[in-house]
Image (tube, rainbow, N blue to C red):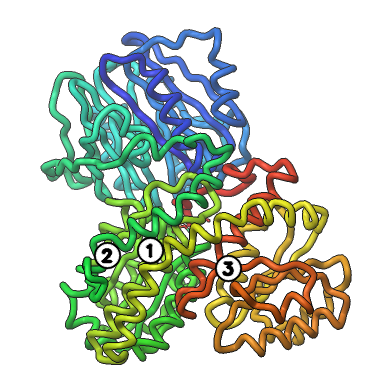
Amino acid sequence: MCGIVGYIGDRDAYDVLIKGLRRLEYRGYDSAGLSLMPRAGELNCYKTRGKVAELERYAQDKDKSGTLGIAHTRWATHGEPNDINAHPHYSQSGDLSMIHNGIIENYVTLRTKLEQVGYTFKSTTDSEVVVNLIEYIRNTMGLDLCSSVQHALNQVVGAYAIAVIDRNDPNLLIGARKSSPLVVGVGENEFFLASDATPIVEYTNKVVYLDDEQIVLLRRGEEMKIVDLSNVVVTPEIHELTLDLSVLEKGGYPHFMLKEIYEQSRTIQDCIRGRVNSEGTEVILSGVSQNRDKFMAAGRIIFVACGTSWHAALIGKQMIEEFCRIPAYVEYASEFRYRNPVINEDDIVIAISQSGETADTLAAVELAKQKKAFVYGICNVVGSSIARATHSGSYIHVGPEVGVASTKAFTGQVTTLAMLTITIAKERGTISDERYVQMIKSLQQLPQQMDVVLKQREKIEELSKIFTYANNFIYLGRGYNYPVALEGALKLKEISYIHAEGYPAAEMKHGPIALIDAEMPVVAIATSDSIYEKTISNIQEIKARSGRVLALVSEGDNQIGNIVDYVIEVPTTDEFLMPILSSIPLQLLAYFIAVNKGRDVDRPRNLAKSVTVE
Ligand code: G6P
């Protein structure tokens, strides 16, 4: 969702900004724009609806000079996606140019006040209000730009990451954040600003993550300065990035999504590495060992998450209850945060988020902290807002995920939840020593088994052709495979725009079975588990009504092949780890169906990778 890039230094800002916007494309957007300052007193702004490529075309024969600039990809919230609502926005005098990610909740009140003193607005965005408020404060109070930004942000209610430049000061770039991410890159005589580190990593590995209500002043030839909204000076904490640039490229694959699907056997290894000892007899999650008392005394575990991460949480709940015997609950972060939930001091709230920036999940974390629960984060992006806001946590370590549809993050989340479960269960004595070792062994076999699943690419590609025609799909599973059914359906919806529903197989007869006919493909996840026979009965019910069934089965299953129309085999593993293998063919199926339909797989319409607004 909305991407921000800013640059001040000796390079041509245009090149840095366009490259940066391309790196942020994965976040999802519908318009793009930039402002460049060629010299003092001059500001050029180019913006357009559509992709970054369109912005480049638009700017082709225009003045692109300047070593200071800001750029933005907008995912529309207030006001339709068009050229006028695209960022940057200008203040009334044309002196200030600003980009914004987030939502200003009291923008109507602020806008009315500004209109009463003569301000007019070109766009219907909440963002244009902020840049005019800054200007109004600067003019009426006679303050410098930083203090004006400070005063303005003190009046704003909502979420923001902003970057502001003043055409009369070609040496200053200002950034500020609250609830929306902003990272500063520190180079030699140059600074970068961005929503995440991906546009920065090419130039420097030194970054500073701004905290909420902090303003950064990036002045040419000077050290960076950070102040908070009360004007207290903050010492910047410089972090070293370990991101490898090649992971941000497609590496020969036609889409990031396919690359990320294929990376999974390695990313699961990366996720496990350093946590399972070399003998394979022990799992150590430092977040758990450092907070052993909390986990020993936990009354309940409450998972909060959104989207695919919410599906991973459903699997985590089953694992925790089965092996740790702690009551576990799964909440949509967006619901949890607004319904005054019961949270006790001995509850552990586990927030799962790939990006670590999802606004609702972050708000749920803050709420849980207010209520004094111990809050644990399971994130992918190192240094992200949720990773920093939680008391402790575990990174999933699967590397940057660029494709909007989450794949390797999901399997990384489930793997991390498995390690968390094994660790807590051992500590609490709810599993035997033999079971503990057996679970670790199964965990270690996963990367190899994933390779076996991934070898089925051709078969799945062929099957995808049979199903591309369909307008609706049903995905069924039970137990650990029920969340896999939800995730399979979500993948298909997200990238192919085919309507798909995930259902617990036995619930079919309470409604969805009415939809079954020869036109309705059903994907049944029926691996050999403790409820295998029950799932078979559910499949029989569908076949009895002429449904077309594609079943995901365990290797060597010679029973289901006689009942269903098509079969995909996956290796057998411990039941609680099955989702890590069974989700992969469904990722591939969704991918190939979307490709067959000519969809923009990595950037599906209306979706954002990182949802930084609620
Ligand atoms: C968006 C993404 C999904 C993701 C969800 C939660 O909807 O498109 O892929 O699952 O946000 O994101 P998070 O970063 O918190 O896991």
For the residues labelled 1 and 3, say whether their Cβ atoms are less than 8 Å apart.
Answer: no
x, y percent for residue 461: 69, 51
For the residue marked with disc 1, what is the amino acid?
Ala
Task: Indicate the secondary structure of the residue bearing disc 1.
Answer: helix
Q: Residue at x 38, y 79 (%)?
A: 302
Residue 357 in view here: no
The label shown at residue 390 is 2
First reached walking from the N terminus: tag 1 or tag 3: 1
Looking at the image, which residue is at 65% across and 55% down? 590
Residue highlighted by disc 1: 363
Q: Are marks 1 and 2 in contact (CB under 8 Å)?
A: no
What amino acid is labelled 2 in the image?
Answer: Thr
Q: Which mark is residue 580?
A: none
Q: CA distance from mark 3 to mark 2?
A: 36 Å
The Cα atoms of the two marked residues, 1 and 2, are separated by: 11 Å
Q: Nearer the viewer, residue 60 or 74?
A: 60
- Name the residue beneath numbered marker 3: 570
Q: Is residue 157 above or below residue 26?
A: below
Residue 278 position by quadrant: bottom left
